[in-house]
Amino acid sequence: MKVLLRSDVDGVGRRGDIVEVAGGFARNFLLPEGRAMIAPDGVVGQAAAMRRSRDLREAKDREAAETQVSVLSGTVLRLEARAGSAGKLFGSVSAADVADAVKAQKGVEVDRRHVVLDEPIKAVGTYEVPVRILDDIGTTVTVEVVAAG
């Protein structure tokens, strides 16, 4: 069954693509969820318009991501956290804390999901933290965790 995708569907295609899918998949998932519509022969123009708007949005997102990366590259963030005498933190510094510090210290809004921390920071020290705005656009910021007080 030929359908026009109205939104991105993993493993199938992106918005504006006309794809061939199994009839059951289209009837039971894509059509009821509003993710696709049946593609008659005259829908090619609508598909092209959807792809054009998708490409414009992606270009705008890419430009915004490159601007954020240029502001963040080489940044040193200073975070204060309560710590014991041995340098171990009472709690931890998470990706959300790093994102909040970026906003407070650099004025750049970064989603916490873009901050790549394998595990929370639990000790005082200097850490290199990757920030991935898009899959292929990112940078590394230096986070200095110091004891508060």
Image (cartoon, grey):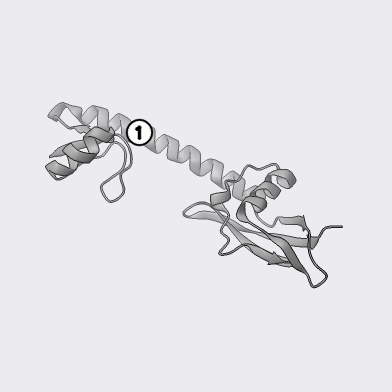
Q: Nearer the viewer, residue 11 or 32?
A: 32
Q: Name the residue under label 1.
A: 52
Quarter of the image for the C terminus: give it: bottom right
Q: Which of 27 and 115 is in front in this view?
A: 27
Marker count (numbered) = 1
Q: Nearer the viewer, residue 14 or 146?
A: 146
- What is the crowding at mark 1: few (fewer than 14 residues within 10 Å), some, or many (at least 20)? few
Measured along the vertical axis of the image, is residue 63 above or below residue 146? above
Q: Is residue 124 visible?
A: no
User: Which residue is found at the position 24% from the left and 28% from the top?
Assistant: 45
User: Residue 27: x percent and y percent?
Assistant: 16, 37
Q: Is residue 38 visible?
A: yes
Q: Is residue 110 left or right of residue 57?
A: right
> Residue at the right extreme?
149
* Disc 1 secondary structure class: helix
Quarter of the image for the N terminus: give it: top left
Measured along the vertical axis of the image, is residue 96 above or below residue 86? above
User: Which residue is found at the position 60% from the left and 44% from the top?
Assistant: 67
Q: Is residue 99 left or right of residue 27?
A: right
User: Residue 85: x percent and y percent?
Assistant: 83, 70
User: Residue 30: x percent and y percent?
Assistant: 24, 38
| Amino acid at pointer 1 | Arg
User: Residue 142: x percent and y percent?
Assistant: 69, 61
- The quadrant holding residue 42 is top left
